[in-house]
Image: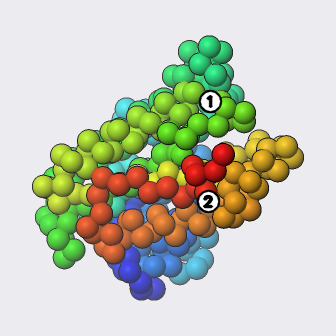
Amino acid sequence: MSGRLDQNVILITGSTGIAAETAKLAAREGALLFVASRTEEHCRELAGEIRAAGGRCEFLAADLADSGSAGRVLERCLETFGRLDALYNVAGVSGRRWGDGPLHECSEEGWNATMDTNAKSMFLMCRAALNHFLKQPVGASGLRGSILNMASVLAWSPQPRFFATHAYAASKGAIIAMSKAMASYYAPHKIRVNVIAPALVLTPMSRRAQADPELTAFMRNKQPLTGGIIDAGEVARVSVFLLSNDARAVTGDVITVDAGWSVTG
């Protein structure tokens, strides 16, 4: 199996939705995949699907908000493949179940759970990857490595009627600010850092939205390019480009995949 990611080692956090679709597409493009997420069953299922299609995928189940997990994940990836070319931080949650909502109603538990899972886990994974990239020789692409972080259009384009989850928005805004600062600092070290910011996508995390007829009717107008909720494969295709050497001159960008969300009323 060969393609534009031929033999590139990509570490993806998350094992369903956008993470899974990106992993499968990257494998078809020739990448060597390492997947880390909280649920071992999901990791095993994704790895099995990629292997059955002729790709290479290894995994480790871990709570990425735990301070020791990032080091263990990176170590296992390096033991398996010997290097790391790109890190894609996808894993995240909606904090509604813990009490995220409008700020005056948001519980402290909702705030902490959302920020830990979405922002702290990304900080820990980026820190581990950067410490490795800084010691890794420059590759044939002229780069040491690349990081792609998952944000959301809600970081700057709020929707108060259906998506008043303020801890979630804050976590995604923090990811954008951190990523831009990283991109500036690490560009001279030949390390790229970018952000992808989707709107509402068909994933397990959006099942509540998918089951709400009023919301899905609203989304047909809010995301007119896709006539509703975006398929995860649409985000995966942009992700693979940003992870590949085709994007070797791109850093510090926030790429929006929102089907028109941010430019509609």
What residue is shown at x 27% (from left), y 69% (from top)?
248
What residue is shown at x 48% (from left), y 45% (from top)?
151
Residue toward you, 115 or 197: 197
Q: Which mark is residue 127?
A: none
Q: Which mark is residue 259?
A: 2
Residue toward you, 150 or 252: 252
In the rendered view, would you say 8 is above or below 194? Answer: below
| Amino acid at circle 2 | Ala
- Foreground disc of the pair 2, 1: 2
Picture coordinates of residue 96, whole percent (x, y): 67, 29
The first of marks 2 and 1 along the sequence is 1
Q: Is residue 190 left or right of residue 72?
A: left
Picture coordinates of residue 116, whole percent (x, y): 47, 30
What residue is shown at x 45% (from left), y 79% (from top)?
29
Mark 2 residue element: loop
| Amino acid at circle 1 | Thr
Confirm whether residue 138 shows in the render. Answer: yes
Residue named by callout 1: 165
Picture coordinates of residue 108, whole percent (x, y): 56, 15
Mark 1 residue element: loop
